[in-house]
Amino acid sequence: MVIKASAASEIRQLIAALGGPDEVRREASIARLAVIGARAADGLHKAYAGASDRDTRLAILRALESTGDRRTIAIARQAIAEGGDVGVAAAEALRGLLDSPHAPTSTEALDVLVATALDPAPERLVRLAAFDAMRGIPEGVRERVAEALRSDPDERLKARAADASRDVAAADDIWQDALEGSLPDTAGALRDAAQTRAAAGALTSLQKMIDACRVREGAVTRAKRPEWQALRGALHQALALRGSRIAVYDLRETVQEAKGHVPTSFLAALHVVGDKSCLEPLAGAYARAGPSDARWKSQLAAAFRAIARRERITRRHVVIKRIASRWPEAVRELTARA
């Protein structure tokens, strides 16, 4: 596949950000690479081979989930052998290949997951991750793996296998009820269900769920609001991973109404799908931030600049002029070279 020079440059910059210290930029880069898809696979594979730290390898594995590239299987095998959270991320990356239209790819990915789940050698958390990654496969196949695990010497794996069908059915019920407008009592239950279901959910359904979560967030006690806001952020990330702007209005309004910081997931989604209507709320949040909020201001500025660059908004644009009339100092800093 021939990649234009401008696209190749963007991919290099995004991959470089995966190893950086800025969490928002890293999450935004993962989402943007997911949108780019297969075109980013070569660069991601090369980056993984040269990565020396765990956090970078974790980010690369997450970015590889959406590429559909068969070579990811070889990297996943290596990561599973390494173990720990890198091995867990490898299982997640393989889950992304289970729906591949290329039958040999999906079959080999499933074979690796099954072998990992049944092999007593890998760490327990990696084996559990491999078993959980098979949630989307036909129930009969997963049940055969669960049956084999019910005689495993590891008691935790036996218990997970025994509860597997019930847990999947419960999560399916929670997700379906939420799609129909009936949210569970706790945000955590829906967030767990969303982890494996949001990627394939209808875009309009996810939008409606975001709206419903926002209403619930306003109705619960102050102590419970952060968990509902975090759930909204996770749903926004699922939309951003698919390049959808269907709920940009909620991102914009959340930043506009925020009294302080918002979860990283909101700014990461803004990096990828935010439009020019989001610039004024970002500038307002930047102007309201205090001197002790240097990191928060840096994250806001990065999102502002990413949107302005993508939308080709210059200092002469009417949006920037409007922002300058309200927050002249903020706009000088936001439009300065990073």
Image: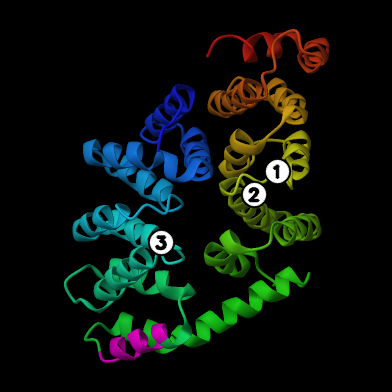
- State if disc 3 and disc 1 touch (CB < 8 Å): no
Magenta extent: 141-151
Q: Left or right of 321: which side holds 338?
A: left
- Pick the front one: 310 or 167: 310
Q: Which residue is mark 2?
A: 236
Q: Which of the two discs, 1 and 3, labels the residue nearer the N terminus?
A: 3
Question: Mark 3: which secondary structure?
Answer: loop
Residue at the far front: name it. 2
Residue 27, image x, y percentages: 49, 41
Q: Left or right of 252: which side holds 50?
A: left
- Disc number placed over residue 150 in the picture, else none: none
Q: Residue at x 36, y 74 (%)?
A: 131
Q: Left or right of 66: which side holds 183?
A: right
Rounded to the nearest angstrom, the CA distance separating label 2 from label 1 is 9 Å
Question: Mark 2: which secondary structure?
Answer: helix
Residue 279, image x, y percentages: 72, 25
Residue 92, image x, y percentages: 39, 60
- Comparing labels 1 and 3, the label whose residue is closer to the camera: 3
Q: Which residue is mark 3?
A: 97
Q: Which residue is mark 1?
A: 245
Identity, as a three-letter code, of the amino acid under mark 1 = Arg
- Comparing labels 2 and 1, the label whose residue is closer to the camera: 1
Residue 300, image x, y percentages: 62, 27
Q: Quadrant of the N terminus?
A: top left
